[in-house]
Image (cartoon, grey):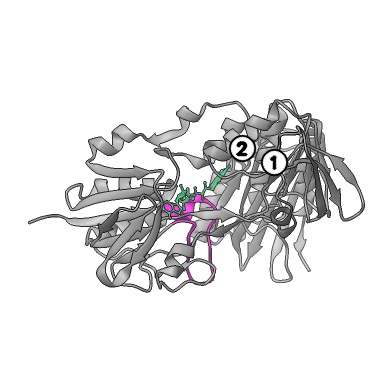
Amino acid sequence: MPKAHLIIIGNGMACGRLLDEILKRNPDQYRITVFGAEGYANYNRIMLSPVLAGEMQADEIITHSEQWYQQHNITLHSGDPVVGIATEDKTLTCQSGQTFSYDELVFATGSNPVMPPVAQACELDGILSFRNLDDIDRIMARVSTIKHATVVGGGLLGLEAAWGLRQQGLDVTVIHRAGWLLNRQLDPAAGKLLQQSLEARGIQFKLKAQISYFNGEQRHASDTTNALRTIVLDDGTTLNTGLAVIAIGVSPNHELAQNSGLACDRGILVDDQMQSSHPNIYALGECTQFGKHTFGLVAPLWDQASVLANRLCNLPGQRFRVQPCATKLKVSGIDLFSAGEFLDDPESESVICQDPTNGVYRKLIFRHQRLTGAVLFGAVNDGNWYFELIQSQTKVQQLVPDLIFGRRYCDGDAIAQLTPAGAVNTDTAAPLSLATGATS
Ligand SMILES: Cc1cc2nc3c(=O)[nH]c(=O)nc-3n(C[C@H](O)[C@H](O)[C@H](O)COP(=O)(O)OP(=O)(O)OC[C@H]3O[C@@H](n4cnc5c(N)ncnc54)[C@H](O)[C@@H]3O)c2cc1C
């Protein structure tokens, strides 16, 4: 009997993980075909940041080579995006014009970078996104011809782009709409410490700032488009810059699904087994919306891949649920960790521990005697331990506020290191200042 045909649209990180999970469970169940819009085998998108910074080469971040697909009898069509789906007769058409029929179909189309309307309107050379290997090529093609680059967005992606461009020898300014950096992961105090560390590395910041407009000019008489020359901010500041990397967020890539009649809101709507509104059509990764949640980090995608692999391999029901995520910044020399909640509210309690001399800051947030958030800057050794406590929702009543001093202290090993001030720094053995209290 012929095997059922499974087609996956999108050859990104979620697809790679799903393939691994399916092969682990039952490598013989399906004939598998993958369509990728990018002209590459599967690579670790997370590592684009070290590639931009010159710390890694593009070929070092390949996770599933073309050879890997061949070895596992998976047909890969790279550089050939799917452009239409006829759900009633279970067929799809790709850009090259070929049509394929499927038994089971998976959307793994990821997300698109959000571009501000002011950037879309001006059509200048040198306004770029930072999402894929082609973006890196476009950015690198400009780097050698300019002195200054601007990054729009002070989130994880924007700061990693800024660091990469700085490592390429450019002067870099980051424009950020909020009042502090990583305002979706850090509280203002940690955001300020991060800013100081990045400023010490030569990156400049314009906070609470927005772009009013971009200006360009023709570089050569033969140019058909103008090149970016200046950015004017809403406070009137003008930046002379030859490159603007836009990193203000992503939005789920669900256009094809929507055009095919699948229920979509901000992303492709899926249930807790990653099924879309249509039978035999599933979705995972950043293209999805689960309840009110959309996704921007890989950890939930790994859970989705495991759930969907079980479903496709007819294994007992595992169900997807949204869990707290931990984030780190990939800028060498900066230790930063954030998981769960990071801002105070009237229902929570927080404990803060600071060691300004050593640039160490720790904040833990508790709710109903359980740890619900951790922000660590400068000393992150205990990050994973805090994250486990957040995930397990262990009652930590007796440990508050000791928990702030880290695992070794709470296990009793660090008592000997108590400082005269009565506090201990398990990472630096320097005196710390401690603040606790209900927040309001
Ligand atoms: C620079 C950078 C750094 C990051 N760092 C981190 C990090 O440190 N930690 C973390 O957790 N996350 C990080 N992320 C986010 C992480 O990379 C994403 O969460 C992850 O890649 C999403 O996987 P995905 O498969 O859903 O989407 P993608 O990996 O984007 O893959 C989707 C693929 O589908 C293709 N596609 C779209 N439409 C079609 C079509 N019609 N036909 C065929 N193919 C199509 C796209 O071209 C793309 O190749 C980072 C992202 C970037 C860009």
Tag 1, which secondary structure? loop
What residue would you read off at disc 1? 224
Q: Residue at x 64, y 52 (%)?
A: 374
Residue 177 lies within the magenta run:
no
**Residue 145 position by quadrant:** top right
Residue 440: where, in percent of width, then height? 78, 69
Q: Could you tell me if residue 137 is visible in this image?
A: yes
What residue would you read off at disc 2? 330
Looking at the figure, which quarter contains the N terminus?
bottom left
Residue 121: where, in percent of width, then height? 72, 56
Residue closer to the observer: 28 or 412: 28
**Amino acid type shown at disc 1:** Thr
Residue closer to the observer: 205 or 91: 91
**Amino acid type shown at disc 2:** Lys
Q: Main secondary structure of the magenta part?
A: loop
Q: What segment is highlighted magenta in the picture?
A: 285-302
Q: Residue at x 54, y 38 (%)?
A: 134
Neighbours of disc 2 within 10 Å: few (<14), some (14-19), many (20+): many
Neighbours of disc 1 within 10 Å: few (<14), some (14-19), many (20+): few
Residue 417: where, in percent of width, then height? 69, 34
Q: Is residue 353 left or right of residue 337?
A: right
Q: Is residue 364 left or right of residue 315?
A: right
What number is the disc on residue 91?
none
Report if the beta carbon of the residue with label 2 is closer than 8 angstroms to ligand 1. Answer: yes
**Residue 101 position by quadrant:** bottom left
Q: Residue at x 73, y 67 (%)?
A: 345
